[in-house]
Image: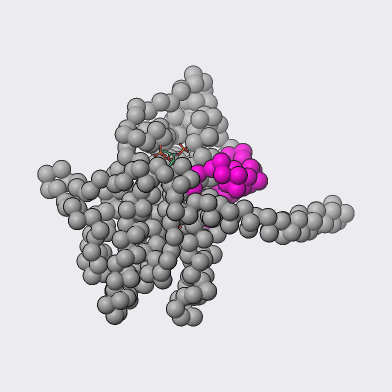
Amino acid sequence: MSAPVIAVEDSEEQAHFDALIDADLRIEPRDWMPEAYRKTLIRQISQHAHSEIIGMQPEANWITRAPSLKRKAILIAKVQDEAGHGLYLYSAAQTLGITREEMTDQLIEGRARYSSIFNYHTPTWADMGAIGWLVDGAAICNQVPLCRASYGPYGRAMVRICKEESFHQRQGFEILLELSNGTPEQKQMAQDAVNRWYWPSLMMFGPTDDASPNSARSMAWKIKRFSNDDLRQRFVGMCVPQFEALGLECPDKNLRFDEETGQWLMSEIDWSEFDAVLDGRGPANTERLKRRREAHENGAWVREAAAAYAAKQSAKDRIAA
Ligand code: 3HC
């Protein structure tokens, strides 16, 4: 991990900010904050919000094909939750001085990042299980520490998000458990889906610590509480007993716990695949952005109607006042 680079301004405001961070207190929108802190938060929170919104697509793909009414209702609820998470996060980012329109433009014009994980396809129903168990499981692992992020609106949004993610993770686990205890074909479908999602879910934690340009500074500011590799380790450790409970095999045959170092030893992640996905060359990057752009264009009339309604309401309020 690169050394923390925090440009310290010699001012009373900077001293007050530093004291709040040192004391593990929260920075609120009204507080002075270094420009780089504000920019880092806008970057991370907006990327996170975009991930939630784009993340609706791989699962929405299965709503019309869910195997039962109950499964359909659960999946609809989950996809709606992701939309809600996006909204909490866009709202948190807006408190830092960026508008929703700017963030939306950055996303649909392909200028913003969103999580690599949502650029993979979901060919079978078992992918709904693997996404819930592995992707939402990795999200929880990464996001529970963010509930303690130093920026108040972000930390508070994360508390609510994490509660819902826990339900998502359990419903994914339950889908896989049922398939794993079903016919041999169903069990194989579950194993294939887990094989597809295991490595990409490890990539969700970001590059290794020594290749992560933002970690050191974000940790010094207590936005991130743990490094990418530490969280990845924690996640792998959580998965091992769950693989056993599911009766499925971990795709990493080299995975083992090293008592001496207290670390999980694993096969090398294919970082060239991660780089390609970040570079827009993943299996579904193009279609995810295209779909998002179309949804935005198709929703123009809703935004116009909402703006006209808001203008009418405020005119009414002015007359009444
Ligand atoms: N996908 C896409 N981009 C990634 C990435 C990933 N998996 N991991 C890292 N990156 C990007 C970073 O955004 C950064 O890009 P930038 O500098 O151009 O903005 C670059 O790669 C270098 O990575 P760093 O480790 O230096 O970046 P961070 O310190 O920001 O750490 C992170 C990356 C761990 C993802 C951190 O931003 C984070 O914890 N974000 C909040 C959580 C989040 O956004 N999760 C996304 C998934 S949301 C989700 O899973 C929804 C759920 O419903 C399933």
Q: Please name the residue shown 37% across and 33% down the image.
A: 216
Q: Please name the residue shown 55% across and 59% down the image.
A: 83
In the image, residue 114 above or below residue 78: above
Q: How is the image coloured?
A: one colour
Taking the view exactly as shown, the residue that stands out farthest to the left is: 260
State the image coordinates of residue 240 (x, y, percent, origin top left): 23, 59
Q: Please name the residue shown 31% across and 34% down the image.
A: 210
Q: Nearer the viewer, residue 228 or 299?
A: 299
In the displayed structure image, the side of residue 166 where residue 53 appears, left or right? right
Work out whether residue 68 can be spotted.
yes
Q: Please name the residue shown 39% across and 33% down the image.
A: 213
State the image coordinates of residue 10 (x, y, percent, origin top left): 49, 19
In the displayed structure image, the side of residue 143 where residue 88 appears, left or right? right
Count of residue discs: 0
In the displayed structure image, the side of residue 257 where residue 280 appears, left or right? right
Taking the view exactly as shown, the residue that stands out farthest to the right is: 319
In the image, residue 131 above or below residue 2: below
In the displayed structure image, the side of residue 148 where residue 229 appears, left or right? left
Q: Is residue 156 magenta?
A: no
In the image, the segment drawn in magenta is 85-114
Q: Is residue 96 magenta?
A: yes
